[in-house]
Amino acid sequence: MRGYTRLVALLKKARTVLVIGHQNSDPDAVCSAYAFSVLSRKINPKLKIHFASPDGVSKLSQQVLRTVPMEVSEDPNVSSTDLIVTVDTNTLQQLGALKEPVLHSGKPIVMIDHHAPHPENAKTAALVHCDDSSTSTCEMILEMYEKLRVPVAKDVSQALLIGMLVETGHMSIATRRTFRSACRLVEAGAEPQAALRVTRTSMDESERIARVKSAQRLRLERVGKWLVALSEVGSYHASAARGLIALGAHLAVVAGKRNDDLTLSFRSTREFVEQTGIHVGSDLATPLGAKMGGMGGGHSTAAGASVKGEVNEALKFTLVMIRELVSQSSKSNTGFEGIGDASSQSRVTTQK
């Protein structure tokens, strides 16, 4: 309860709170921010709370916000707030243009997140509440309500269920704890079918093209008994990586560069993580970020990194790390060789 006591003290002392999600905030960030805002006002009814998402929110979040009553700011006045709270944000690097204003604001920072903890966070935040055993930040916020003995209103339960459904891939990676949390939300008034309707969306043409291009540019490598897919697209990196996993890869890394920003998305099967013991977030994304002058982190099977440099360089470093990690694993065979046709054995080709 020590962390909760500290959080309550910070909320009671503040007059204004700025809640921030990561760039292009997804429903887990948006819905956890809404539920946290309601909880904060229960603790301090005089609080004024604003929510910001650098570069706006995702397409699916825009759809979710039709049912979640919360306004979003892309360019908030950081200096005018008393307390800054980040949700579903692994590192401050994910705040984009808001990173520097937040860092230099002199305001206390609270980080609430369900990714593997990043070592830099403890240096900058007044309070880090991180639980990477949770499948979503929404699940963590629900536990806050329960620990602080605050009843969950129907609209809050609906928002939390929506965020939870999206973050777990409609429960495809849910744990027993996740299902218990979902049951508590339904008991509090959440409507499962309504939540499912708002979280289902069709893939638009640009995302489909990105997925197809990632397959066209695929470089497939065998590392031990594992198939590792590497590719490059300009956008929809996470979706493209998921697509490569669906095609049959055990581990997929998709990179893309826009201006000077180089981002990578990592996805893996649960089988790969369980048998190798490799945590895609802390063992791949985080060290790659540190090596290439940026930041990285994420979950055991899904992660991302924002770094400096070139695509081929980043993919090369990643492949070297994968080779070393697999060779160290007692549960995997060593060995590394390219497979596939001639084009797949060549280095990743940058297509403008």
Image: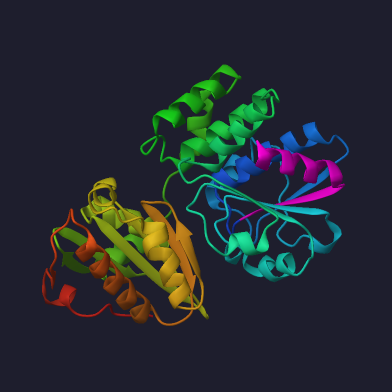
Q: How is the image coloured?
A: rainbow
Number of on-image labels: 0
Residue toward you, 9 or 65:
9
Which residue is located at x 40 percent, y 35 percent?
A: 174
Residue drawn at x 83%, y 41% as measured from the top left: 12
Q: Quadrant of the C terminus?
A: bottom left
The answer to which quarter of the image holds residue 216 is: bottom left
Vertical order, 259 against 176 (above or below):
below
Q: Is 308 left or right of 52, judged from the image as shown?
A: left
Evaluate whether residue 274 shows in this view: yes
Q: Nearer the viewer, residue 228 or 271?
A: 271
User: In front: 59, or 335?
Assistant: 335
Q: Is residue 37 magenta?
A: no
Measuring 68% from the left and 39% from the top, which residue is drawn there?
Answer: 4
Q: Residue 64 vs residue 73: left or right?
A: left
Residue drawn at the location 31% of the way across and 65% of the way down:
214
265 relative to 56 in the view: left or right: left
The region drawn magenta spans: 1-21
Q: Residue furthest front?
A: 2
Locate residue 151, reporting x and y percent. Answer: 69, 22
**Percent x, y for residue 78?**
79, 61
217 vs 249: above or below:
below
Residue 46 at what x, y percent from top left?
Answer: 88, 38
Is 209 left, or right, of 247 in this rendering? right
Q: Residue furthest top?
A: 187
Up/down of 22 relative to 317, above or below: above
Q: Quadrant of the N terminus?
A: top right
Q: Position of residue 112 (x, y in %)?
A: 61, 48
Give the quarter of the image for residue 69. top right
Q: Look at the image and tell me whether residue 218 can be seen.
A: no
